[in-house]
Image (cartoon, rainbow, N blue to C red):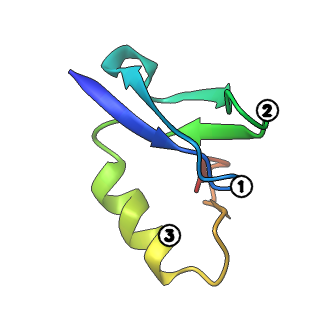
């Protein structure tokens, strides 16, 4: 299984193997640091991002979404 990752800064998209979930990585194009949520967190992360005022959200435990 693969994940499609999209950089929140430049919009670049690429495929990532499923074992890349729940990791921080850098965008291949602009080097922005981003967090890929755990596959179990994706529905909750999407809901939080849609409700937030900005494109990046950090929850109370320090997890970064966006």
Which residue corresponds to the image point at 39% horizontal and 63% vertical from the top-left?
46
Relative to 63, is 44 on the left or the right? left
**Few, some or many residues within 10 Å of mark 1 (<14, 14–19, 20+):** some
Compared to residue 26, the image places residue 51 above or below, namely below
Which residue corresponds to the image point at 37% horizontal and 15% vertical from the top-left?
19
Q: Mark 3 and 2 residues: CB-CB less than 8 Å, in contact?
A: no
| Image location (x, y in percent) of residue 61 | 62, 50
The answer to whether one can see residue 4 in this image is yes
Q: Which mark is residue 9?
A: 1
Relative to 54, is 15 on the left or the right? left
Numbered disc 2: secondary structure? loop
Which residue corresponds to the image point at 37% horizontal and 37% vertical from the top-left?
4
Relative to 22, is 61 on the left or the right? right
Compared to residue 63, the image places residue 51 above or below, namely below
Q: Mark 1 or mark 3, which has the lower sequence index?
A: 1
Compared to residue 3, the image places residue 60 above or below, namely below
For marks 3 and 2, give the one nearer the viewer: 2
Q: Mark 1 or mark 2, which has the lower sequence index?
A: 1
The residue to which callout 3 is attached is 49
| Image location (x, y in percent) of residue 60 | 63, 59
Which residue corresponds to the image point at 48% horizontal and 82% vertical from the top-left?
51
Position of the C terminus by quadrant: bottom right
Distance (Cα) linking label 1 and label 3? 14 Å
Numbered disc 3: secondary structure? helix
Numbered disc 1: secondary structure? loop
The residue to which callout 2 is attached is 31
Distance (Cα) linking label 1 and label 2? 10 Å
**Few, some or many residues within 10 Å of mark 3 (<14, 14–19, 20+):** some
Q: Which mark is residue 53?
A: none
| Image location (x, y in percent) of residue 56 | 66, 63
**Few, some or many residues within 10 Å of mark 2 (<14, 14–19, 20+):** few
């Amino acid at each position: 299984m693969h994940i499609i990752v999209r950089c929140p800064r430049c919009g670049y998209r690429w495929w990532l193997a499923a074992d890349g979930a729940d990791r921080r990585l850098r965008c291949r194009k602009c080097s922005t640091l981003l967090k890929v949520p755990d596959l179990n967190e994706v529905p909750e992360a999407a809901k939080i991002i849609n409700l937030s005022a900005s494109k990046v959200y950090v929850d109370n435990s320090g997890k970064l979404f966006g």
